[in-house]
Amino acid sequence: MSNKAEGMGCLDLPNGEQYKGQFSNNMRNGYGIYKFRNGDIYKGSWKNGLFEGYGIYTFASKAKYKGQFKRGQRDGVGIYRYKDGRMIWKGEYKEGVIKEGVIRRSSYITDITHKDVIS
């Protein structure tokens, strides 16, 4: 009998964080929910222990990102909604960095690029 985690399960970590979801080959693989000690929550796909594919990351502040992840980072198309809900960023990320997209504030839309965000 193998001691590797396989199938559905729950992992309570010593630091107070928790994972509930699918395991394969002793790693988080498939769909799962991870609750961070700081109050952040990730619900979505996992591959080899990292966020991979579609997921929803809700920050403790109530801001939220819905979109694609790759190797544990935002990567691909996604939507970031600020905690008050009045400002939304919709665009493309690459390796966790905003590349380009549209920001919506209340009633207007502005096209911006990564350079606009960091300047």
Image: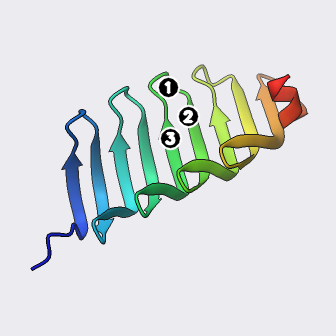
Label 1 to label 2: alpha-carbon separation: 6 Å
| Residue 94, above or below 40 | below
Identify the amino acid type marked 1. Lys
Q: Are marks 1 and 2 in contact (CB under 8 Å)?
A: yes
Q: Position of residue 103 (x, y in %)?
A: 80, 32
78 on left or right of 43: right
The disc, 2 or 3, on the residue closer to the chain's N-terminal end is: 3
Q: Quadrant of residue 39?
A: top left
Image quadrant holding the N terminus, namely: bottom left
**Whole-number angstrom distance, CA of label 1 to CA of label 3:** 10 Å
Residue tagged 1? 62
The amino acid pointed to by label 3 is Tyr
Which residue type carries mark 2?
Answer: Lys
Q: Which residue is mark 3?
A: 57
User: Which color mode does the image show?
Assistant: rainbow
SS of the residue under disc 2: strand
Residue 41, quarter of picture: top left
- Is residue 68 toward the left or the right of residue 108 in the image? left
**Total numbered circles:** 3
| Residue at (27% x, 66% y) in the render | 26
Question: With 13 as the anchor, is 87 left or right in this view?
Answer: right
Label 1 residue SS: loop
Q: Which residue is mark 2?
A: 64
Residue at the image point whose x is 36% and y is 55% from the top: 32
Is residue 48 depicted above or below 17 in this figure? below
> Residue 118: x, y in percent?
80, 26
Which residue sits at x=88%, y=28%? 116
